[in-house]
Amino acid sequence: MESEITIRPEVVLKGIAAAPGIACGAAYLYSKHVPQVQVKSIVPKEVEGEVQRLRNATSRSEKELSKIHAFAEQRLGSQNARIFEAQIMILSDQILMGSIEKRIGAELKNAEAIVADEINKYKRVMLASPDEYMHERAHDVDDIMNRIIRNIQDQKLYSRLEGESIIVSETLAPADTVVFSRNQILGYATDMGGVTSHAAILSRSLKIPAVVGLRTATKLIKTGDTIALDGYAGVVVLNPTEETLQTLMQKRQRFKEFEERLVDIAGLPAETPDHKHIELSANIEFDDEIEFCRQQGSAGIGLFRTESQLIGKERYPTEEEQYEVYRAVADGISPHSVIFRTFDVGGDKIGPDTEHEENPFLGWRGIRAMLDRPELFLAQLRSILRASSGKNVRIMFPMVSNVTEILRAKAMVEQAKKELNTRGMPYDAGVKVGVMVEIPAAAVMADQIAGEVDFLSIGTNDLIQYLLAVDRNNNAVQSVYQPFHPAVLRTIKHIIEAGHKRGVWVGMCGEMAGDPLATVLLVGLGIDELSVIPVVLPEIKKIILSIRQRDAKRVAEKALSLPTDQEVRDYLWSVMRDRLPEIPFEEQSDIGVPP
Amino acid sequence: MIEQTVTILNRKGLHTRPAALLVKTAARFQSELTLAKDGFEINGKSIIGVMTLAAEQGSQLTIRVEGPDEEEAAAAIVAIFERKFDEE
C-alpha cells in the first residue's frame, strides 16, 4: 500500500511578472465551469415545477449579470462594461424563453436539457459563420447558457472560493477578474496572457500580485495545493519548501519596507542630485487609473492608449464619446500634461475593422491606417483638441516611418482645428504634437523627424522587435528579444542625440522605460522623459533621485562599449548592487535555481 | 402580410447594438416579424435570433410582417434600416 503521506517536490514555474507583490496560499483552480447536462424525462405534472426552476434560474442569472455589469461599470467605465449587456439582453429574449418553456411541456424533458439544446442551435449557427465577430458572440451565448444551466442546477460558481486563495486559470476574462476582485484574492496565476492582457492591467489597478504566461500552471496545480507567487520575478512555486517560503517572506518584507519609504518621495520631482530633471510620467489606458497615478507621484500621463476605447466594440467611438473620455483624463491629471496617442490598431491590437493580414506587424497599422481614414482620424483629433482647451494636452502619432506621414498628420490636425473654429469650439491653439519612434527607419531619420515635431517618444516594444527582427509574441524566439542588445542601446543614443540637436525633448514610453535595470543607463544617455506603468513609478523615481547624471553618463558609456545583451545586463546589475544597495532590486529570482 | 427587401447600409452590419434596436422596435407592435436571409429565417423579436444573422454591410434581408398593425410595423422597421440604425 502506498503511503498516505508523500513529500511532494517543489516545482518552479516561470512566467511573466504582470503585477507586483508576493503571495503564498492555497491554489484555487478556476476553469470555465461547464455544467454537466443530463437529459431526463419528466411526467406532465412535473412540467410546472420545471418551468418554475427555469424562471428562477433566469432571474437569478439576470441579477448576477446586472451586478457584474454595475461593478464593471464602476471599475472599468461604462464603455467597457457594455460587453455584458448583450448577455443581459439574451436573458430577456421572450421568444427564446417562450420556446424553451413550450418545449419542456411538449417534449417532457428537464429544463436544463432543453435550455442546452435550444441555445446550442444558435451557437452552432454562429460558429459556422466565417465572421470572427460571430465567434465572439458564440462565446457570449455559451456563457449565458452555462450560467442559466448552473442556476437551474443550483450550483454556485464561486461557492468553493472561500477564504483566501490564489486563482490559477488558463486565462481570465474581464468578468472573472471583476467577480474575483470582490473576494479575498491573494494573487492570480494564468497560463496565457502578457503584461498588457486585460487581467494583468486589472490586477495591477486592484493591487493584486499576478504572474501570467505560465503555460502549464493549470496542468500542474490542483485546487488546495500550496503555492507561492512572486509578482516581481514572474515566478510561481508549487509545493514551496520551508526555505523558499522564508526567502519569499523576507523578500516581501524587504519590498514592503522599501515601498513604505517610497511614499515619502511621491511628492518630489524626479531629479538627479546634480539637477537633471526627468519628466517621470505614467502609461495608462483607462481614465480611472488617474487617481492611482497621482498617488504614485506621477508628473503626468506620458502615454494614454486611446485603443482602450475599442475593447469589445463593433465600431469606432464617436467624437462625443471620445471627447468624454479625453476630457476626463485631461481634467483629472491637470495641471500636469497628458499625451494622447492616436488610435494604434493593427499589429496585435485589433480594431473594429481590422482585416486579416499575412503580416500584421508590417501592415496597415498606426498612423498608416488613420491617414487612410480621414473621417475617423479627424473625429479623434477634434475630440482630443476639444479636451485640450484650458488643459495640458499633447498629441502623439504611432508607427511613423517617414517624414511625409508626419506632414500629412499635422495637416489633419490643422484641418481639425479649422473645423472647430467653424463650430466656434475652443481648443489649445498651441497644442504640442509629437511622434513615437518605434520603426528603425524613423530612428535613423530621427533628426529630420525631430525637425517637424515638438517631441519624440521612443516606443521600445516595437522598436526592439523591428530592429532585432523578433516577434515579441513568439515564445520560440523570446531569447533573442533583447532590450539590452547593444544595437538597441546605440539606436536609443542616436535618437536622443538627434532630438537634442533639433531642440526637442526625447522621452520613452515602452516597457524598457519602466525597467529599473535600464534607468541609470537611460539617464546617462540624456533621456528627458520616462513614461512607465504606474506601479513601478516610485522605484524608478528613487533611482533617479539617487544617481548623479554625471555618473550615469559614465555608466552609459561603459554599457555601450559592451558586445552582448548579457554583458550589458551583468554590468548594469553590478552598478545597481554597488551604487544603489538600498533598492531591493532582483536581477532574477533565485528561487528554485539549483545550487 | 407585407414582404419587403431591405439592404444593410450601416458599415458594421447587424451587430449587437443594431440588433437590439431592431428587436426593441419590433416589440412595440403586435405583428410578427420574420427576417430571412439566404433561406434562413428567424423571428425578428428575438435578440439571440437576430444576432445569428451575420448580415454585413451591403447584404440583403427579406422582412415579413404579419398582424393587425403590419403596415405601421413594416414602415417603422424599414425606416430604421434606412436610417442605418442611427449609427452613422
Image (cartoon, coloured by chain):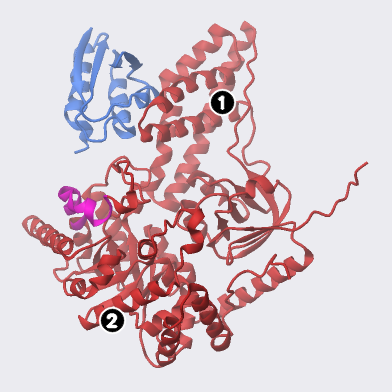
Q: Tag 2 or tag 1, which sits nearer the N-term?
A: 1
Chain shown in blue = B
For residue A380: magenta?
Answer: yes
- Picture coordinates of residue A101, whole percent (x, y): 51, 15
For the C terminus of chain A, give its image quadrant.
Answer: bottom right
Tell me if I can see residue A539 in this picture: no
Question: Chain for mark 1?
Answer: A
Which one is closest to the eye, mark 1 or mark 2?
2
Dominant SS type (magenta) = helix
Chain shown in red = A
What label sits on residue A56 in the rendered view? Answer: 1
- Picture coordinates of residue A352, whole percent (x, y): 30, 43
Q: Mark 2 points at which residue?
A: A497
Tell me if I can see residue B25 in this picture: yes
For residue A19, above or below residue B29: below
Tell me how far mark 1 sits from mark 2, CA to CA. Answer: 68 Å
For residue A261: magenta?
Answer: no
Q: Give the range drawn in magenta.
A: A364-381
Q: In this view, does A323 lie to the left or right of A558?
A: left
- Picture coordinates of residue A190, whole percent (x, y): 57, 51
- Picture coordinates of residue B55, whole percent (x, y): 28, 26
In the foreground, A455 or A45: A455
Q: Is residue A64 left or right of residue A451?
A: right
- Neighbor class of circle 1 (other Cα within 10 Å; few <14, some 14-19, many 20+) is some
Judged from the image, the secondary structure of the residue bearing numbered disc 2 is helix
